[in-house]
Image (spheres, rainbow, N blue to C red):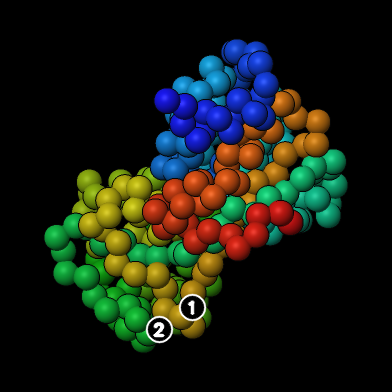
């Protein structure tokens, strides 16, 4: 019996030409849902999808530097800035969803209340080791976290006991394997590593919701367009929600 996915892809592709290789640069928050969606696409079409996951900023830069790159998924603000500066030209943008920044704690440990700025401040001061993604590499949450600890007046105290990780994956490795007291990254990246490690998003006054979008040049292949259609489909929006990404009310920018 044909699945809805196979019927959709057959309609989009017509008679498939097997073997096309789609290279996708994407923010790490989408690693889990993209992996599942790509596996379905590959099984239905015979095409292959190669992902390069990194911080939002590094993803956008690597995409521009790679002539083989087909699709880009990163923060909407980065895409808009790159278009304004002429670094991305002749393309189309689709909004995928929003991701909240949050704090992770080792599974089984006591999870402090961080529901207000003062309670978050107390938790950060009480922690012995903290990890967060590198702001210098374009980590959206890392940049935000630096602003938060400065606004709370505890920047020096926190940085003395903090480890700057390459990305959210490394941040969560430090929490899960090295038992760091607190890891700061995107909630979807926390969920991907361990659903038992999620504490909560930042307090509402300090909340960070990052809108992620997909961008591609207008001259992409039919196979790539079929994959884009799949990524912005209702089924994919459901998959995003299951992985901590709030689906977009509308996809087209």
Q: Which residue is mark 1?
A: 206
Q: Nearer the viewer, residue 90 or 138?
A: 90
Disc tally is 2
Which residue is at 24% across, 50% downward?
A: 176
* Horizontal side, residue 197 vs residue 77: left or right: left
**Based on the displayed image, in which of its 4 quarters is residue 169 positioned?**
top left
Residue 114's disc is none
* Horizontal side, residue 103 vs residue 224: left or right: left
3D distance between C-alphas at marks 2 and 1: 7 Å
Residue 74 position in % (x across, y down): 61, 49
Residue 7 position in % (x across, y down): 55, 30
Q: Quadrant of the C terminus?
A: bottom right
Q: Nearer the viewer, residue 14 or 209?
A: 14
Residue projecting furthest to the left? 108
Which residue is at 47% across, 64% downward?
A: 100
Which residue is at 58% across, 33% downward?
A: 8
Residue 184 position in % (x across, y down): 39, 61
Position above or below: 16 against 237 = above
* Horizontal side, residue 4 vs residue 211: left or right: left
Residue 117's disc is 2
C-beta proximity under 8 Å, tags 2 and 1: yes
* Horizontal side, residue 222 vs residue 176: left or right: right
Residue 204 position in % (x across, y down): 46, 80
């Amino acid at each position: 019996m044909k699945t809805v996915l196979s019927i959709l892809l057959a309609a989009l592709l017509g008679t498939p030409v097997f073997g096309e290789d789609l290279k996708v640069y994407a923010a790490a928050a989408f690693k889990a849902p993209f992996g599942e969606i790509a596996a379905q696409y590959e099984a239905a079409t015979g095409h292959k999808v190669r992902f390069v996951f990194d911080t939002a900023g590094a993803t956008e830069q690597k995409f521009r530097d790679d002539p083989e790159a087909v699709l880009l998924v990163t923060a909407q603000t980065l895409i808009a800035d790159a278009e304004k500066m002429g670094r991305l030209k002749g393309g189309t943008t689709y909004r995928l969803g929003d991701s909240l920044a949050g704090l992770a704690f080792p599974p089984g440990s006591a999870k402090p209340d961080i529901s207000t700025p003062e309670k978050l401040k107390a938790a950060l001061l009480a922690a012995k080791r903290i990890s967060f993604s590198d702001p210098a590499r374009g980590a959206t949450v890392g940049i935000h976290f630096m602003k938060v600890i400065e606004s709370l007046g505890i920047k020096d105290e926190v940085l003395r006991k903090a480890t700057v990780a390459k990305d959210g994956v490394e941040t969560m490795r430090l929490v899960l394997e090295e038992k760091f007291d607190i890891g700061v990254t995107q909630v979807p990246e926390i969920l991907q590593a361990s659903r038992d490690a999620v504490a909560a998003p930042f307090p509402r006054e300090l909340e960070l919701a990052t809108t992620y979008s997909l961008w591609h040049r207008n001259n992409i292949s039919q196979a790539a367009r079929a994959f884009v259609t799949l990524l912005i489909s209702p089924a994919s929006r459901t998959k995003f929600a299951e992985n901590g990404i709030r689906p977009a009310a509308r996809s087209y920018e």
